[in-house]
């Protein structure tokens, strides 16, 4: 450990020239933390608040039709929005404060799998137009779905922002739904960047009646469910639901303190045991980050410089994404990165620099990691 501390200590000289991401004044950090925290929700509506559950739940108990079939089944506090067949559904729950998205089983096949959210707050029970929920620490877990079990396929950190952007008391839907009392929820899955998002239209007493997908601020897809049928709702086939499946993910949770961040560097990047906590080497790195001598990016650069060189390029790339972006790497990106490393067109330090200076890292991870104390 002393040799390790000495080697890593030498690396600080080069890293110190990187502008520190954690040297903000206390007021700036407090302001940042406030923007990343969801607005407090209460079970008591304020003047002007909308009871979102009355729009989310289909109280007419009839299936809808349109772009494809769509129906809803409610079991206790679980809400199943069933799409084109019984094995293609989303499962939500609710309590006095929130509606939560817990599982998206919409793909509904073993090949396409399923994913779950934690904690998945989708809407506040009472919201005014303009209210948002900012899920700074939401995690996504992807599954391969079998006939009677779920196996881990990947996932990781997935922050998102949900905003109630409109209320239309008389929104024209066409079909035999005609004009309905509708609210619109924007689900921004690019962490508030406002370029890629979904719009969910909920009609009071009918649930979801329209859905739109925007990519690069351009409408890419629309689905509408504006025909009331005489059919009873299609119940979900929950035999291979993955919600609640215990998993041990390779992706660590986003650290909640500088102590947690340094521990993550040791355990995730270097695969050391947690016994390093409190050692002189550990305290050295913690103090470097606390006093602003070392930036978040600089810490990553140094630790990856001392990662075992015996790791294959595939192991290196997968570990880099898991420990910096806190998600598993998609197959196409992994194939490209490994091919470049194998060919020698990029080095490992260059790849680390590319990831920790990427638009994704700067928009999603860096603001939270920089605010740690």
Image: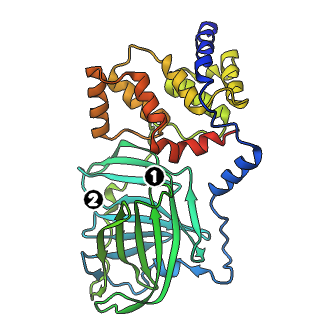
Name the secondary structure under disc 1: loop
Q: Quadrant of the N terminus?
A: top right
Q: Tell which of 349 and 331 is nearer to you.
A: 349
Q: Quadrant of residue 131?
A: bottom right
Q: Is residue 11 left or right of residue 323?
A: right
Q: Is residue 251 above or below residue 293?
A: below
Name the secondary structure under disc 2: loop
The numbered dot on residue 108 is 2
Number of callouts: 2
Q: Is residue 105 left or right of residue 270?
A: left
Question: Which residue extends farthest right?
Answer: 26
* CA–CA distance in space, label 2 to label 1: 17 Å
x 27%, y 87%: residue: 229
Near mark 1 (Cα within 10 A), the count class, few <14, some 14-19 or many ≥20, is few
x 67%, y 51%: residue: 33
The numbered dot on residue 2 is none
Q: Quadrant of residue 37?
A: bottom right
Q: Is residue 50 above or below residue 35?
A: below
Near mark 2 (Cα within 10 A), the count class, few <14, some 14-19 or many ≥20, is many
Q: Quadrant of the C terminus?
A: top right
The residue labelled by disc 1 is: 244
Q: Please state which of the two labelled residues, at mark 2 or mark 1, is closer to the viewer.
A: 2
Q: Are marks 2 and 1 in contact (CB under 8 Å)?
A: no
Q: Position of residue 159 (x, y in %)?
A: 50, 52
Q: Is residue 138 above or below residue 91?
A: above
Q: Position of residue 71 (x, y in %)?
A: 33, 76
Q: Position of residue 130 (x, y in %)?
A: 58, 73
Q: Position of residue 144 (x, y in %)?
A: 30, 46
């Amino acid at each position: 450990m002393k040799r390790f501390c000495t080697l890593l200590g030498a690396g600080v000289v080069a890293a110190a020239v990187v502008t520190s991401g954690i040297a903000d004044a206390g007021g700036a950090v407090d302001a940042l933390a406030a923007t990343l925290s969801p607005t407090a929700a209460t079970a008591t509506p304020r003047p002007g608040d909308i009871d979102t559950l009355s729009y989310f739940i289909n109280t007419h108990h009839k299936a809808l039709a349109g772009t494809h079939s769509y129906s809803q089944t409610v079991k206790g506090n679980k809400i199943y929005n069933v799409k084109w067949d019984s094995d293609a559904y989303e499962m939500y729950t609710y309590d006095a404060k929130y509606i939560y998205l817990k599982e998206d089983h919409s793909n509904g096949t073993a090949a396409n799998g399923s994913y779950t959210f934690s904690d998945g707050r989708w809407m506040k029970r009472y919201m005014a137009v303009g209210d948002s929920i900012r899920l700074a620490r939401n995690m996504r877990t992807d599954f391969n779905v079998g006939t009677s079990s779920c196996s881990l396929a990947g996932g990781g950190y997935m922050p998102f922002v949900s905003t109630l952007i409109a209320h239309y008391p008389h929104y024209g839907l066409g079909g035999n739904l005609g004009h309905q009392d509708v609210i619109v929820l924007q689900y921004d899955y690019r962490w508030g960047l406002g370029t890629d998002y979904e719009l969910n239209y909920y009609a009071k007493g009918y649930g979801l009646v329209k859905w739109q997908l925007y990519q690069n601020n351009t409408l890419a897809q629309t689905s509408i469910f504006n025909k009331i049928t005489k059919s009873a709702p299609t119940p979900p086939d929950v035999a291979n639901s993955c919600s609640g499946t215990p998993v041990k993910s390779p992706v660590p949770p986003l650290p909640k303190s500088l102590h947690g961040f340094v521990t993550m560097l040791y355990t995730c990047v270097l695969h050391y045991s947690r016994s390093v906590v409190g050692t002189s080497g550990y305290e050295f790195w913690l103090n470097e980050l606390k006093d602003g001598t070392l930036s978040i990016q600089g810490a990553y650069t140094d630790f990856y410089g001392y990662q075992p060189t015996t790791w294959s390029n595939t192991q290196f790339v997968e570990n880099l994404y898991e420990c910096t972006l806190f998600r598993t790497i998609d197959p196409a990106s992994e194939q490209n990165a490994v091919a470049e490393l194998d060919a020698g067109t990029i080095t490992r330090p260059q790849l680390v620099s590319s990831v920790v200076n990427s638009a994704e890292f700067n928009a999603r991870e860096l603001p939270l990691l920089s605010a740690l104390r």
